[in-house]
Image: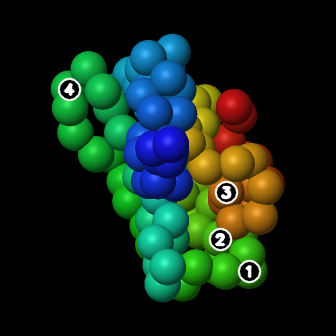
């Protein structure tokens, strides 16, 4: 039996999520990416195809929370108060959840 790798399964989940959400200049998409060493977050305007703000830090929960707060500061500086959260196929727990909680505490609405 042919087994699929975690990467292929995550990419399939990512495609399903991205089919439903599209970032706009008024309400951009907050995209989260995890690597083994770092955690990245970006505010993306899908209509124009550009990144409005980005932030990264070490891949742990404490830094993930700080990344969320930093993204909220950058978004509020650009008069963005509401966003769409794109978890990129990851489960909503741990670092991904910490980013969203930090962004909510920073003043963003999902």
Q: Which residue is mark 4?
A: 48
Are the residues at dot 2 and dot 1 in contact (C-beta closer than 8 Å)?
A: yes
Counting residues from the start of the chain, the first of labels 4 and 1 encountered is 4
Residue ranking furthest to the front:
1
Tell me the SS state at disc 4.
Answer: loop
Mark 3 vs mark 4, foreground winner is 3
Mark 1 vs mark 3, foreground winner is 3
Q: Residue at x 77, y 64 (%)?
A: 94
Residue 62 marker: 1
Tell me the SS state at disc 2.
Answer: helix
Mark 4 vs mark 1, foreground winner is 1
In the rendered view, does 103 fall on the left or right side of 55?
Answer: right
- Say if 94 sits above or below 13 in the image: below
**Which of the 4 image quadrants contains residue 97?**
bottom right
Mark 4 vs mark 2, foreground winner is 2
x then y, percent, for residue 60 = 67, 80
Mark 3 vs mark 2, foreground winner is 3
Q: CA distance from mark 2 to mark 1?
A: 5 Å
Q: Residues within 10 Å of mark 1 (few under 14, many from 20)?
A: some
x then y, percent, for residue 45 = 33, 31
Are the residues at dot 3 and dot 4 in contact (C-beta closer than 8 Å)?
A: no
Q: Which residue is mark 3?
A: 96
Counting residues from the start of the chain, the first of labels 3 and 4 encountered is 4
Are the residues at dot 3 and dot 2 in contact (C-beta closer than 8 Å)?
A: yes
Q: Which residue is mark 2?
A: 64
Point out the image quarter for the C terminus. Answer: top right
x then y, percent, for residue 103 = 68, 53
x then y, percent, for residue 65 = 71, 69
Counting residues from the start of the chain, the first of labels 4 and 2 encountered is 4
């Amino acid at each position: 039996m042919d087994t699929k790798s975690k990467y292929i399964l995550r990419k399939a989940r990512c495609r399903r999520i991205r089919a439903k959400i599209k970032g706009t200049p008024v309400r951009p998409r907050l995209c989260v990416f995890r690597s083994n060493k770092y955690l990245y977050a970006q505010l993306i305007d899908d209509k124009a195809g550009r990144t409005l703000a980005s932030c990264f830090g070490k891949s742990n929960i404490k830094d993930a929370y700080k990344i969320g707060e930093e993204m909220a500061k950058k978004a509020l500086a650009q008069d963005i108060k509401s966003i769409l959260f794109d978890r990129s196929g990851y489960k909503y727990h741990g670092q991904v959840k910490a980013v969203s909680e930090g962004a909510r505490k920073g003043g963003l609405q999902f």
